[in-house]
Image (spheres, rainbow, N blue to C red):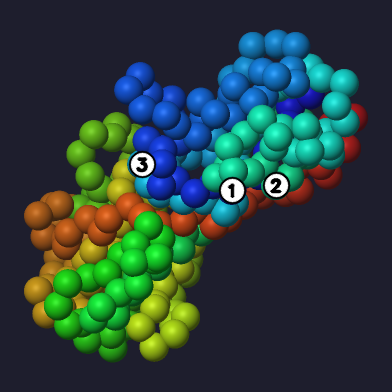
Amino acid sequence: MKNTLLTIAYDGTNYGGWQVQPNSVTIEEKLSRALSRIADNPIKIVGSGRTDAKVHASGQKANVFLNTKVPVERIPFALNPFLPDDIVVRKAEEVHSEFHARYDAIKKTYRYRMNFDEFPDPILRNYSYTPKGSCNLRSIQEALGVFKGTHDFKGFMSTGSEVKSTIRTIYRIDFQSMSNSQKEIVITGNGFLYNMVRIIVGTLVDVGCGKRSISDIQKALLKGERSLAGHTAPPQGLVLEEVLYPVNPLEKLKENR
């Protein structure tokens, strides 16, 4: 069996998130069913991380052990006809047997889209967040730097997750303009806690709307109390854009042979 790394894009609007759940349709469920159509063994997918209901991805990663006559590079062509139109496998590559899509990841990049139109385009409602009230975009820009670096992000994590450490490193966080009213926050880190990106975005929006200050962010980082951070931004603006690994998986495969 070949350990195969998949790159997956999906529109999360109609799904209950990545992970299989008893009462909702999920991305993992749809992929498992499609993979079972081309494989001769039980399918277990290992995702690079879970995305919540209505969260999107353009570069989600997952590895799976497959026993199939389909050449690895042709797997997307074999899989996609069995997937709904809002899920696409964009790439498949063979990786070494010990590769793990979640534990081997060293960086992830998320993109969060916002729309500051007074009367927002309804076409964008499933792919962006429209904050209520007026926001000072310059204040949001000024607050970004507080998050950069290594911090204890306990105050920026929703309950319901068990992790050994809440310390994470943010390598990059930018506030970018797509148009006069459409903006996005791009954030790259070595890992993210449950709802961490959405809470960071919500906190920045609260700063822009005058509900919180930069000193409030600093206190939330220092004391680790969720009540000191801002609201959790809604899921539909969030896109998992990229997952990076320390070396090219194919190169490591060749080294092990």
**Which residue was labeled with disc 3?**
53
Residue at the image position 54 percent from the left and 35 percent from the top: 47
Q: What element carries label 1?
A: strand
Residue at the image position 22 percent from the left and 44 percent from the top: 158
Marks 3/1 in contact by CB < 8 Å: the verdict is: no
Left or right of 150, for residue 36: right
Residue at the image position 79 percent from the left and 24 percent from the top: 2
Give me the C-alpha separation between circle 2 and circle 3: 21 Å
Whether 37 is drawn above or below 25: the answer is above
Quadrant of the rendered image containing residue 177: bottom left
| Type of amino acid at the residue the image marks with label 3 | Ala
Marks 1/2 in contact by CB < 8 Å: the verdict is: yes
Give me the C-alpha separation between circle 3 and circle 1: 15 Å
Q: What element carries label 3?
A: loop
**Which residue was labeled with disc 2?**
90
Give me the C-alpha separation between circle 1 and circle 2: 7 Å
Residue at the image position 50 percent from the left and 34 percent from the top: 27
**Which residue was labeled with disc 1?**
9
Whether 55 is drawn above or below 201: the answer is above
Q: Position of residue 252 (x, y in %)?
A: 80, 40
| Type of amino acid at the residue the image marks with label 1 | Ala
Can residue 54 be spotted in the picture? yes
Q: Point out the tag, 3 or 1, that comes first from the N-terminus.
A: 1
